[in-house]
């Protein structure tokens, strides 16, 4: 039985794209980097924490044939890690910082079964157009930035802010599907 340990509707949609049947586990883990922790290590650690938290939600009986998937996505600009904005001011600050620059989106996926755990990571480069203050304010007023790492959504109006993408569209949106499918196959799940 396949489980997705995530509250993110985007991840449900993306995993659904692979045609697999799965159930949702609600997990809420602390997302705070350790001092000096490299962004790629942080993202992988949080994805693993989510998968292990999901695993702990299952009864022993369910664990017997379970595979739990979890993911984490962060936006990184010059070693600054942008998670989900706390409020509108935070969203404006993030979008101002991203404006006219290229940032990285790091998405880690982690899978845990009774026998083993495996992870993989996808790094994309996203170049934002130079945004004016009114453009940023108007975008934040749509509400779309909330709940999204870096305060934008590539799958929504945020697409209009992106001049160039190098990497994985699904990774930026929250679940890198190439890596996810490859890991699923390694666990014997046909996708
Ligand atoms: C950059 C970007 C992020 N996002 C979203 C994906 C993730 O839901 C969110 C990053 O926050 P996460 O902490 O990775 O995930 P989450 O808290 O939303 O969900 P979970 O329960 O699985 O922990 O940002 C987009 O939807 N579009 C984008 O373009």
Image: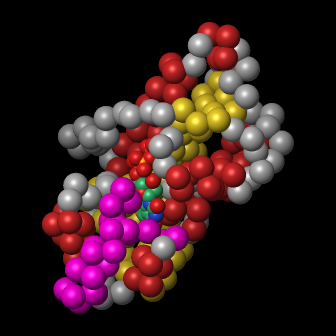
Region of the chain picked out in magenta, as a range: 131-155
What residue do we see at 47% from left, 43% from top?
7
Give residue 98's quadrant in the image: bottom left
Q: Is residue 149 visible?
A: no
Colouring: secondary structure
Which residue reaches farthest left? 89
Q: Can residue 138 be found in the magenta stretch?
A: yes
What residue do we see at 20% from left, 65% from top?
88
Q: Is residue 88 visible?
A: yes
Closer to us: 6 or 181: 6
Give residue 41's quadrant in the image: top left
Which residue reaches farthest front? 142
Which quarter of the figure is the N terminus placed in?
A: top right
What residue do we see at 27% from left, 75% from top?
141
- In screen coordinates, is 54 left or right of 134? right
Q: Is residue 128 above or below residue 83?
A: below
- In screen coordinates, is 168 left or right of 182? left
**x%, y% of residue 51?**
52, 32
Q: Is residue 187 above or below residue 134?
A: above
Closer to us: 165 or 150: 150
Which residue reaches farthest right? 190
**x%, y% of residue 39?**
35, 50
**x%, y% of residue 143?**
33, 68
**x%, y% of residue 132?**
23, 89
Number of callouts in the render?
0
Quadrant of ligand 1 in image = bottom left
Q: Is residue 160 above or below residue 74?
A: below
Q: Can residue 72 be found in the magenta stretch?
A: no
What residue do we see at 75% from left, 33% from top?
187
Q: Is residue 31 above or below residue 179?
A: above
């Amino acid at each position: 039985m396949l489980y997705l340990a995530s509250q993110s509707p985007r991840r449900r949609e993306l995993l659904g794209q692979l045609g697999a049947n799965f159930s949702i586990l609600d997990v809420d883990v602390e997302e705070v980097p350790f001092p000096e922790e490299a962004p790629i290590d942080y993202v992988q650690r949080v994805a693993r924490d989510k998968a292990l938290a999901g695993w702990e939600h299952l009864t022993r009986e369910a664990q017997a044939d379970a595979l739990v998937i979890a993911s984490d996505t962060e936006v990184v600009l010059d070693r600054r890690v942008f998670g989900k904005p706390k409020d509108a001011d935070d969203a404006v600050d993030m979008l101002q910082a991203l404006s006219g620059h290229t940032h990285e989106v790091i998405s880690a996926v982690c899978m845990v079964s009774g026998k083993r755990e495996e992870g993989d990571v996808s790094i994309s480069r996203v170049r934002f157009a130079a945004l004016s203050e009114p453009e940023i304010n108007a975008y934040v007023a749509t509400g779309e930035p909330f709940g999204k790492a870096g305060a934008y959504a590539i799958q929504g109006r945020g697409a209009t802010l992106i001049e160039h993408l190098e990497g994985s569209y699904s990774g930026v949106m929250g679940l890198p599907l190439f890596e996810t499918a490859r890991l699923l196959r390694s666990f014997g799940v046909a996708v």
